[in-house]
Image (cartoon, grey):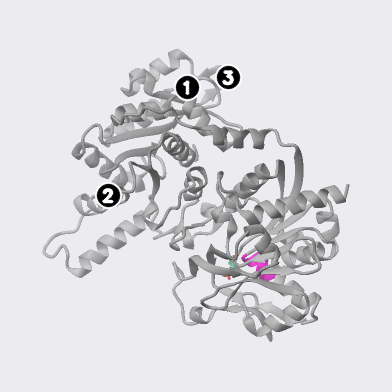
Amino acid sequence: MAKYIFVTGGVTSSLGKGIISASLGKLLQARGFTVTIQKFDPYINIDPGTLNPYEHGECYVTDDGAETDLDLGHYERFLNITTSQANNITTGRIYHNVITKERRGDYLGKTVQVIPHITDEIKRNYLLLGQNGKYDIVITEIGGCVGDIESLPFIEALRQLKWQMGAHELVTIHLTLIPYLKSAGELKTKPTQHSVKQLLEAGVQPDILVCRSEKILSQDIRKKLALFCNVNLNSVIEALDAETIYDVPMLMKKEKLDERVLAKLKLSHKNEPDVTQWKKFLGKIKTPTDEVKIGLVGKYVELPDAYKSIVESFIHAGAENDCRVIVQYISSEDITRDNASEILSGLSGLLVAPGFGERGIKGKIEAIKYVRENKIPFLGICLGMQCAVIEFSRNVLGIKNASSTEINSNSKDPIIDLMEDQKNITMKGGTMRLGAYNCQIKKGTKAAAAYGKTRIKERHRHRYEFNNRYLKKLEKGGMIASGINPETDLVEIIELKNHPWFLGCQYHPELRSTVSNPHPLFIKFVKAALDHSKISL
Ligand code: GLN
C-alpha cells in the first residue's frame, strides 16, 4: 500500500497548494518514487465542468474524459503523468455517491449522517488511488482554507485517517502565509499560529509547515513558528515568492521538503533527486536567445487562469525553440474589421482560444480573416478551429450564411453543427464529447510534420463539430482536413494550403503539453511564429 501526504491551506486561498504539491511530487519522483496527486474540492458541483471560467479558471480534461480542477494540469505538467477522474473529487461527488447508496438501500435502517457516512466516503476516496499497487506515494491536496465550513468534513476525515493509520504512513503539510508588515518592517507569524490552532481544534496536528513569504524567514521566525505550532524546527519550510512556478521544485529542494517528508514516512532514500532535466528546462526559459509575440484571442482574457494550459504550453514550446513567447491577451469583443490590422499587425502568431456561446465570435472571425490574409501563423483550438472553418466558408468560398448552430440554431448553412449523438441530450453536466479520441493524420500535412506520426490520441471537450456535408466544397477551396477520427469520420484537424502555418484542431493540444514532453503542435506553431518574426524584420 502507498504512503500518503496531505496538503492543507491556511490564512488565505491562492497560496499555491497545487504548485507546492506538484513540486514535492516532482522531487519525490526525481528520487525514483512513483507518485500521483489528487485534489479534493469542497464545492457542491459534481465537477467544475458546469462552472464559468471566471469562477474557477480553466476546466482541465483528463484522458478518461473527466472535467477537473486546473491543478490537475499542474500535476500532469510537472510530473509528466496522466491523471483521471479518481484524481479530482468534490463534495458534490461525495454526497452524490452517499445518496445513491442510500437510495439503493445500502444503509437500510440507519440514519445517514455526515459522520460517519460522508467521512467514510471521503476516506474511501482518499485511499483509493493508493490501493492499486501503482504508486509508492499519493499526495492529496485539500482545496479551500482551513476553517471554511465547507471543508470541515474533509479535515475531519483526515483526522480520523491520521489516527487509524500509523504515524509513518501519513504526513500532513500545512501551507500558510507569513505576511510582511511594511509599517512594522516585520514578518508576522500570528495568522499562521491561528490557522494551525484552527487545525488543532479540528484534531489535526500538521507535521510540516510550508510558509509562503516575500522575505527570507530568519532563524528567529522559524523558531517561533516551530514553538507555537508544535513542529520540528527543520519542518518549518520557507517558500519564497518565485519568478516562475517552475522554480518552486528547486526552492523546495533547497529547503529539503522532500527529505523531511521521507524521514517522517520512514521511506529509505539513497538517491538525491535527479533534477538535471528540470534545471536544463529552467535555464532555457530564463535565458532564451529569441523572443516572439503571439496574440491570444479569447473572451476570458481578464482572467489568465482561464487559459492556464495554453499559456504553460507556450512556455514549454518556447523552451524547445530557445525563445520566450510573449503572450498578448486580446479580448475577442474588441476586434472589428476596421481595427483588426491595428491590433494584430505587430504579432508573429495568433491563437484563437476555445470557448462557448455567441459572445466574442464576430471578433474571433475577423481576427482569423486578418491572419489568413496576411499569412501570420495561426492555431485555432476547438471553438478557434470552428471559427476558422466559418471564416473560410464565408470569406473564401462565399457561403455568406455559413455559421455554427451554437451561434444561430436556424442557420441555412450549418458548417459547424451539433453532433448527432448530442441532439437528444438535455443534461448539461459531463455530457459533452469528453476525453481522449483517436485521430488519423494525413501524410504530407503540417500536422503530420509536427507529430512525426499518423496515429494520435488527443483530448476533447465540445458538443459541436465540423459538418461533413461541406467537406468536399471546403477541400476544393483549399482547406485540408488533415486529421480524421477513424471510428466516426469526424474532422479533427484542418489546415490551409496556401499559408505558411494555419492549423485548427477540434481537440485541446494544450492539455497534453508537459515540461518533459512539450506538445508538437505548440512547438511547430511557435517555430512558425519565430520564422515569421524574422521575415518581417
Ligand atoms: N462551444 C464549442 C462546442 O461546444 C467549442 C467548445 C470548446 O472550445 N471547448 O463545440
Say which of 260 and 11 sits in front: 260
Whether 135 is drawn above or below 395: the answer is above
Asked if the residue at label 2 sits under 8 Å from ligand 1, the reply is no
The stretch of residues the image draws in magenta is 382-387
Looking at mark 3, is its residue's CB closer than 8 Å to ligand 1? no
Q: Are marks 2 and 3 in contact (CB under 8 Å)?
A: no
Q: Where residue 42 appears, x then y in whole percent?
A: 38, 50
Residue 529 shown left or right of residue 150 in the figure = right
Residue at point 46%, 24% (across, down):
255
Which one is nearer the viewer's eye here, 10 or 134? 134
Marks counted in the figure total 3
Mark 2, other Cα within 10 Å: few <14 / some 14–19 / many ≥20:
few
Distance between the alpha carbons at the discs numbered 1 and 2: 41 Å
Disc 1 vs disc 2: Cβ atoms closer than 8 Å? no
Which quadrant of the figure has residue 199?
top left
**Residue at image mark 2:** 131
Per the image, label 2 sits on a secondary structure element best described as helix
User: What residue lies at 37% left-to-right and 18% top-to-bottom?
Assistant: 233
Q: Secondary structure at mark 1?
A: loop
C-alpha gap between disc 2 and disc 3: 51 Å
Is 135 included in the stretch rendered in magenta?
Answer: no
Find residue 492 and report its image quarter.
bottom right
Q: Nearer the viewer, mark 3 or mark 1?
A: 1
- Mark positioned earlier in the residue sequence (3 or 1): 3
- The mark closer to the camera, 2 or 3, is 2
Instruction: Give the residue number, with chain letter if any, for mark 3.
Output: 183
Image quadrant of ligand 1 equals: bottom right
Q: Hey, what amino acid is under mark 2?
A: Gln
- The residue labelled by disc 1 is 188
Outermost residue, top side: 220
- Picture residue at 81% right of the left edge, 52% below the top: 532
